[in-house]
Structure formats: C-alpha cells, structure tokens
C-alpha cells in the first residue's frame, strides 16, 4: 500500500540532477534574476533553455522561408 502522506504523482517527474560550474558573478546574476522574478534558479535555467529553443526554431523557419 502506498504512503498517502507523500507528494502526489506527476506525469513527468524530474529524475535527473544537473550540476553546472559558473563564475561567482554569473551565479550572483542568476540568483538576483531569480529572486527579482520570484523563481528558482532551476526555473530560470529551464526558461533560458526554452528561449534558446524558440530562437533556434525561428531562425530555422526564417531560413526555410528565404529559400522558398
């Protein structure tokens, strides 16, 4: 029987831990941004990755349009 006092199950559990070495100044910038926007450092990093993916998609679509 499962423990009913734990967290509810999620569809896509976060099972991996990512460690990144950064400079002191980069760490301070990330912490400051996260605090000012009421986010965790992990949320800031994931949102940054999402923005990079979106940017790359736009560039690929633009190149396709130019070639057509």
Image (cartoon, rainbow, N blue to C red):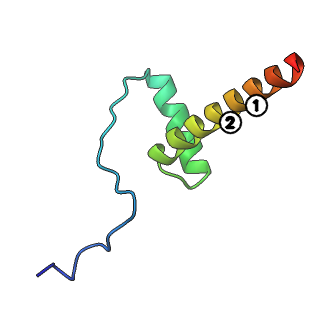
Secondary-structure class at tag 2:
helix
Residue ranking furthest to the front? 68
Q: Nearer the viewer, residue 23 or 48?
A: 48
| Screen quadrant of the N terminus | bottom left
Q: Residue at x 56, y 55 (%)?
A: 38
- The residue located at (51%, 42%) in the rendering is 46
Quadrant (top left/top right/bottom left/bottom right) for the C terminus: top right
Q: Quadrant of residue 33?
A: top right
The circle drawn on residue 54 is: 2
Q: Are marks 1 and 2 in contact (CB under 8 Å)?
A: yes
Q: Quick check: 49 left or right of 42?
A: right
Residue 21 percent coordinates (x, y): 37, 23
Instruction: Tell me the residue at 61%/51% (across/down).
Output: 37
Q: Which residue corresponds to the image point at 80% horizontal and 20% vertical from the top-left? A: 63
39 vs 21, left or right, is right
- 1 vs 35, left or right, is left
> Could you tell me how far apart the alpha carbons at marks 1 and 2 are, in whole angstroms?
6 Å
Please determine whether, in this image, residue 13 is positioned above or below residue 47.
below
Q: What residue occupies the far top of the structure in this picture?
A: 67
Q: Which residue is mark 1?
A: 58
Find residue 64 and report its image quarter: top right
Q: Residue 54 or 31: which is nearer the viewer?
A: 54
Q: Nearer the viewer, residue 39 or 19?
A: 19
Q: Is residue 56 above or below residue 46?
A: above
Crowd class of label 2 (few under 14; some 14 to 19; many from 20; radius 10 Å): few
Q: Is residue 67 left or right of residue 10?
A: right
Q: In the displayed structure, would residue 32 be above or below residue 39?
A: above
């Amino acid at each position: 029987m499962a423990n009913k006092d734990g967290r509810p199950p999620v569809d896509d559990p976060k099972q991996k831990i990512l460690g990144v070495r950064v400079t002191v100044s980069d760490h301070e910038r990330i912490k400051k941004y996260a605090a000012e926007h009421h986010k965790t450092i992990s949320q800031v990093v994931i949102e940054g990755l999402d923005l990079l993916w979106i940017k790359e998609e736009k560039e690929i679509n633009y190149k396709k349009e130019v070639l057509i």
